Amino acid sequence: MNPLYGPYAPSSADRSGNPFVVCEGVSGVGKTTLVAAVAKRLKAATLHTLPEPLNPVSGTVNANLRPLPQFAFYLAGALHASDIAREASRRGPVIADRYVSSVVACHAAVHGLTVDQVTALLEPFRPYLAVPDITFYLRSSEGSLRERMRHKADVKQDDTDLLAVSGRLTSLLATFATVAESDPSAVVLDTDGRTPDDLASIVIDHLERRRA
Ligand SMILES: Nc1ncnc2c1ncn2[C@@H]1O[C@H](COP(=O)(O)OP(=O)(O)O)[C@@H](O)[C@H]1O
Ligand SMILES: Cc1cn([C@H]2C[C@H](O)[C@@H](COP(=O)(O)OP(=O)(O)O)O2)c(=O)[nH]c1=O
């Protein structure tokens, strides 16, 4: 029996037709910039996975917890992000900078797990997780990524590791691709040679076509 009832049940989602949009991809690919550009044009609420109050302790958690408790920590972030998304989508569109796909893809890549194993662990919590209408998986060449990373604000240990730890970028690209393949909301967005504004127009076009 599904144990997510009573106090464990998700709050009712009266989204009034407001879209829940997600941007995914590796660090430095341009998620935060695109989320800000789309939010400005759509007057959408934004959220980030990991949300507050968990976000500031992620470095300590990554450094000190073994893989399973680390997963539980990021899962808590996704569950809380779902609550934030449900609440905000009562009032208007919502766009998220990372969400459940990042939890699966990052955790699998960092700990050398398969996407299937991490997905199985997540499965009992699915009924609680708000379902995105559309998830943009941002991609870029390694050259563009290195260039963007040089200018990125607030670079953390995971960001440095992405390009410094041997095989990390390759495995993250692979886990994101695997997650995208089984995501019915997935749209792959190539970002090379496109400005944040170009990309925001593409995102908004997709949303308008979905509504039509
Ligand atoms: N489409 C783009 N073309 C060129 N540079 C970009 C683009 N999108 C973002 N950037 C730049 O790349 C860097 C990383 O972007 P950011 O949005 O912080 O990435 P993420 O949130 O995916 O880590 C920033 O300096 C940003 O200005
Ligand atoms: C959401 C999530 C992020 N991460 C990692 C990915 C990022 O390298 C790092 C910080 O994410 P984030 O703050 O979104 O930074 P960025 O702007 O670099 O995308 O945390 C995980 O390892 N597991 C997760 O579940």
Image (cartoon, rainbow, N blue to C red):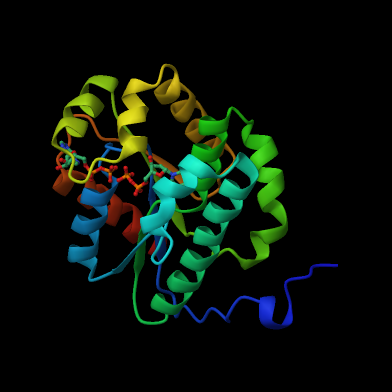
Please report the residue visible at 48 percent of the width from the left and 48 percent of the height from the top.
61
Up-down relation of residue 49 to residue 4 (above or below): above
Foreground residue among 26 and 164: 164
Please report the residue visible at 16 percent of the width from the left and 31 percent of the height from the top.
150
Up-down relation of residue 111 to residue 2 (above or below): above
Up-down relation of residue 103 to residue 162 (above or below): below
Please report the residue visible at 51 percent of the width from the left and 59 percent of the height from the top.
78
Q: Quadrant of ligand 1?
A: top left
Foreground residue among 115 and 159: 159
State whether residue 42 appears in this view.
yes
Residue 118: give x, y in percent of width and height: 65, 41
Q: Which quadrant holds the N terminus?
A: bottom right
Q: Quadrant of residue 137?
A: top left
Please report the residue visible at 63 percent of the width from the left and 31 percent of the height from the top.
113
Q: Residue lying farthest front? A: 64
Residue 46: give x, y in percent of width and height: 31, 65
Residue 192: give x, y in percent of width and height: 22, 29
Residue 94: give x, y in percent of width and height: 36, 67
Image-based side of 18 in relation to 114, left or right: left
State whether residue 49 appears in this view.
no
Q: Quadrant of residue 87?
A: bottom left
